[in-house]
Image (cartoon, grey):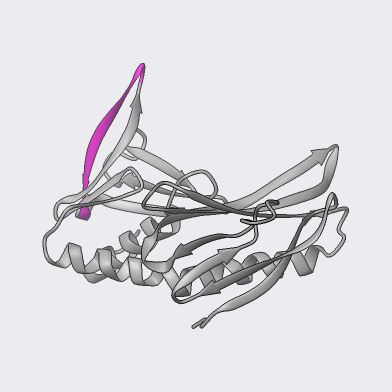
């Protein structure tokens, strides 16, 4: 379990300045701006709403670089962005380890509590959103594509199944997986990690095998 993380991030070859990032149980603090008098963005832990993260690959016949991205949003819809690059394999392992360390610390400090809060709401019979997914006592309501339109569909807990992939997580109906399914990207969709953990734990608590 992480307590806090203090690191310095060099965002790119063009940015020679190492920018302090501080992940603390009570706040996030990052020097993400170039303003003289206001270079930091700070969020209180209690104000953090959701996050998404992932890697952009730079290719030209072969992969020559990658950009690690984090987007953290508060309840005022302000977004704190953390990005850093690796090109031609230079410090690739170091940058990958930094990426993993930031993900693990974000999760431990801010989002395990959020998962537990959602599970308490579920046990109390409440309905809530994670991203654009509605979670309620009957199941989850997702948006699926139907020819020329999109339609909201309820998948009951007994019928709900999921699969994990490298860049996304999918949910689907066991009885009708072709028509009723939806994928959620870790990089593009807000709180996909939280959605996965909540669904996994609800199914486990209900003794429903994800087969």
Instruction: Report the number of discs.
Output: 0
| Residue 52: percent from left, percent from top | 51, 52
The answer to whether 32 appears left or right of 190 in the picture is right
Near-viewer residue (111 or 151): 111
Q: What's the residue at 32%, 62% (across, down)?
A: 198
Q: What's the residue at 46%, 74% (across, down)?
A: 109
The quadrant of the rendering that contains the C terminus is bottom left
Q: What's the residue at 30%, 71% (across, down)?
A: 116
| Residue 42: percent from left, percent from top | 52, 62
| Residue 101: percent from left, percent from top | 62, 72
Near-viewer residue (147 or 195): 195
- Residue 104 in sight in this render: yes
Question: In the rendered structure, does residue 43 fall within the stretch colored magenta?
Answer: no
The answer to whether 211 appears left or right of 71 in the picture is left
Residue span colored magenta: 147-157
The answer to whether 91 appears left or right of 30 in the picture is right
The answer to whether 83 appears left or right of 41 in the picture is right
- Against 101, residue 65 (above or below) is above
Near-viewer residue (52 or 146): 52
- Against 102, residue 146 (above or below) is above
> Residue farthest to the left?
125
Q: Magenta residues: mostly which secondary structure?
A: strand
| Residue 156: percent from left, percent from top | 19, 49
- Against 199, residue 140 (above or below) is above
> Residue farthest to the front?
37
- Residue 208 in sight in this render: no
Question: In the rendered structure, does residue 156 fall within the stretch colored magenta?
Answer: yes
Q: What's the residue at 17%, 53% (across, down)?
A: 127
């Amino acid at each position: 379990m992480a307590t806090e993380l203090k690191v310095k991030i060099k965002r790119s070859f063009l940015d020679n300045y190492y920018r302090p990032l501080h992940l603390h149980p009570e706040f996030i603090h990052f020097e993400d701006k170039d303003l003289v008098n206001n270079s930091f963005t700070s969020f209180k832990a209690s104000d953090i709403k959701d996050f998404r993260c992932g890697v952009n690959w730079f290719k030209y016949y072969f992969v020559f670089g990658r950009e690690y991205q984090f987007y953290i949003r508060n309840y005022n819809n302000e977004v704190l962005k953390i990005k850093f690059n690796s090109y031609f394999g230079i410090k690739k392992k170091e940058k990958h380890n930094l990426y993993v360390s930031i993900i693990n610390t974000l999760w431990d400090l801010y989002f395990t509590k959020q998962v537990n809060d959602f599970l308490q709401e579920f046990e109390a019979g409440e309905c809530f959103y994670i991203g654009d997914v509605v979670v309620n006592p009957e199941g989850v309501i997702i948006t699926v594509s139907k020819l020329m339109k999109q339609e909201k569909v309820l998948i009951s807990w007994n019928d709900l199944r999921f699969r994990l992939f490298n860049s996304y997580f999918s949910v689907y109906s066991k009885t009708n997986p072709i028509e009723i399914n939806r994928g959620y990207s870790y990089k593009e969709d807000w709180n996909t990690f939280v959605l996965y953990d909540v669904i996994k734990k609800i199914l486990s608590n209900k003794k429903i095998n994800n087969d």
